[in-house]
Image (cartoon, rainbow, N blue to C red):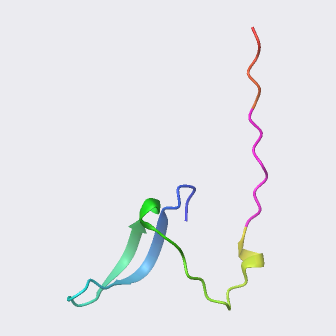
Amino acid sequence: VDISMNTHLKTVKLTVKGKNPVTLDHLSVRGNNIRYYILPDSLNLETLLVEETPRVKPKKPTA
């Protein structure tokens, strides 16, 4: 997942309604097409999440 919520997946099985599943090596999904993620309970989020420090905007010099 990148900063725009775009998601990049590897080894994906794509299933379209009424058609046979297709296996893809790589698939990218644009962030605005994602409603939510379902994560398994066994996933240890404390070790995976990265805490970001707040960004401070530099002040513009006054003329």
Residue extending furthest toward the top: 63
- Highlighted magenta segment, given as a residue range: 50-57
- Seen in the image, is 26 located left or right of residue 40? left
Q: Quadrant of residue 49?
A: bottom right
Q: Residue at x 46, y 74 (%)?
A: 9
Percent of width and height locating residue 20: 23, 90
- Seen in the image, is 45 located left or right of residue 26? right
Q: Residue at x 42, y 82 (%)?
A: 11
Q: Quadrant of the C terminus?
A: top right
Q: Residue at x 54, y 76 (%)?
A: 37
Q: Nearer the viewer, residue 12 or 18?
A: 18
Percent of width and height locating residue 13: 36, 85
Dominant secondary structure, magenta: loop
- Is residue 36 placed above or below 54 in the rendered structure? below
Percent of width and height locating residue 12: 40, 82
Q: Quadrant of residue 18?
A: bottom left
Q: How many marks?
A: 0
- Seen in the image, is 27 located left or right of residue 53? left
Q: Residue at x 75, y 44 (%)?
A: 55
Q: Quadrant of residue 14?
A: bottom left
Q: Is residue 56 magenta?
A: yes
- Seen in the image, is 40 located left or right of residue 23? right
Residue extending furthest toward the front: 35
Q: Quadrant of the N terminus?
A: bottom right
Percent of width and height locating residue 31: 47, 61
